[in-house]
Image (cartoon, helix red, strand yellow):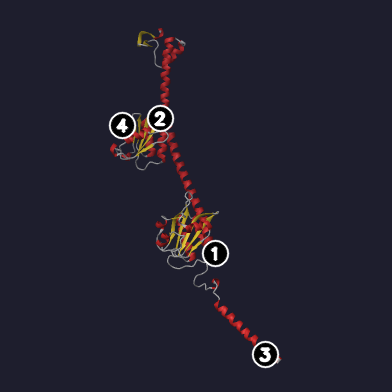
Amino acid sequence: MRRERGQKRDRSEQQEHRHQQADGANMIARAPERPDLQSSEAVPPLSYQQVVSAFGEAAQAINEKTDLDTLLHLVAERICSLLSIRRCSVYLKEPKIGVFRGQVAHSDGNIDPAIKRLTAGIEADGFTQEILRTQKPVLIANAQSDPRPVRSAMLEYNVRAMLGVPMVLRGEVIGLLFLDNEDLPHTYTPEEQELSQTFANLVAIAISQSQLTAELRSTLSTAAQQNAMLRRAAVLEDRLTDLMLDGANLCEIAAAVTEVTGKPCSIHDAEFRRLAHASPPDAGSTRMLDPAGLRNPAVRKALEALTARRPTVLPPLPAAGLHRRSMIALVRVSDEKCGYLVLTEHGTRFGAQDVIVARRTATIIALELSGKQRVADADSHAAEALARDLLHGSDEDISLARRADYHGLALAEPHVVVLFSLREQGTQAALTTASVTDA
């Protein structure tokens, strides 16, 4: 009996073991295939080394002085190649208004012009708002039915599934990558999303460096141009100063301005009568602003609003016979308008150098006129003082003789002295003829 019970127990254990083996086999048969055990022959898994290599190409483009659009095209092409997808669009942030403007796109066709007209980050764009809030990739499995993206854009570009990746630099999103495979299915695995984010952050550094480099180059170029203009203006100023010291006339000044600017130049008095004119040989018979042009309301208005601080530019006025633009600089002495310097556009358009030349030339002419006016006023006052001292004998004879000789007055000759006295009923003149020495 014991032997039979033992045999039954052995047979029961063997059956149970066979059932467990069968259940285990069934579990193995039903177990899903792990993604990392799938065949790598279809789509090779994306690796960090590939991401770094792709970023290295972008960094090399910066060293080669590549412009920003070319760099962004390279970025879009590289990320599409890494993920084996067909389309990527790149958006960059405009700091002043806080939205993202489309820059470039990688696709089968050239859609850059259309992308540049698009804006992301508006209030109705829930897709972008979520990316900005999380600063992480956001995947939309069905872009045409999901309420987060702008539906019209998804339909227009036939977007099925889309991955939005932020480009984060120092905690701020400076750009966005929008990835899709057009109408073909594509599964964006967690590994792909993570490595896409890594690539986007590396690209953010490259883009920031490219923008900084472009700004520095622009600043240096602008500074070099300004320095060159200032040097040319300083050379002209030195030349004009030398001409003034040498007693040059206004015609020589106008010729110097024309030589530097390559444009016709004329100098006018306060009534706009032409005092001097110079023109380059190839200018021909260029019509310049003249007194007849003052009849034009636009000319009169421009002259009335003119200040000594900055020249003004008149547009072409065919009605006044002026078919080219004119630059007018005011010549002012103290608070008095003494004249005008006029340049006519010829050869090239007016630039910053022409403004500097016109303003400095007008200033030098004003200084010269002011100096001459002061000398004339001093001579007039000195002559008045001499006449007063001669009449009243309030100076020594030797000093009076020296002062009279300076003014070309021969004291030994007879002179007519006219004395005026102002009274309530009019002016009465007493005429006396005598020798100045006897006065």
Labels in figure, total: 4
Q: Position of residue 178 (x, y in %)?
A: 47, 60
Q: Nearer the viewer, residue 81 or 118?
A: 118
Near mark 3 (Cα within 10 A), the count class, few <14, some 14-19 or many ≥20, is: few
Disc 1 on helix, strand or loop? helix
Disc 3 to disc 4, how far (Cα)?
Answer: 135 Å
The residue beneath circle 2 is 332
Disc 4 on helix, strand or loop? helix
Q: Quadrant of residue 269?
A: top left
Disc 4 to disc 1, how far (Cα)?
Answer: 77 Å
Type of the residue with mark 2: Arg
Quadrant including the N terminus = bottom right
Q: Quadrant of residue 349?
A: top left
**Between disc 3 and disc 2, whose residue precedes?**
3
Front of the two marks 1 and 3: 3
Disc 1 to disc 3, how far (Cα)?
Answer: 63 Å
The residue beneath circle 1 is 49
Disc 3 on helix, strand or loop? helix
The residue beneath circle 4 is 291
**Between disc 4 and disc 1, whose residue precedes?**
1
The residue beneath circle 3 is 7
Q: Position of residue 199 (x, y in %)?
A: 52, 60
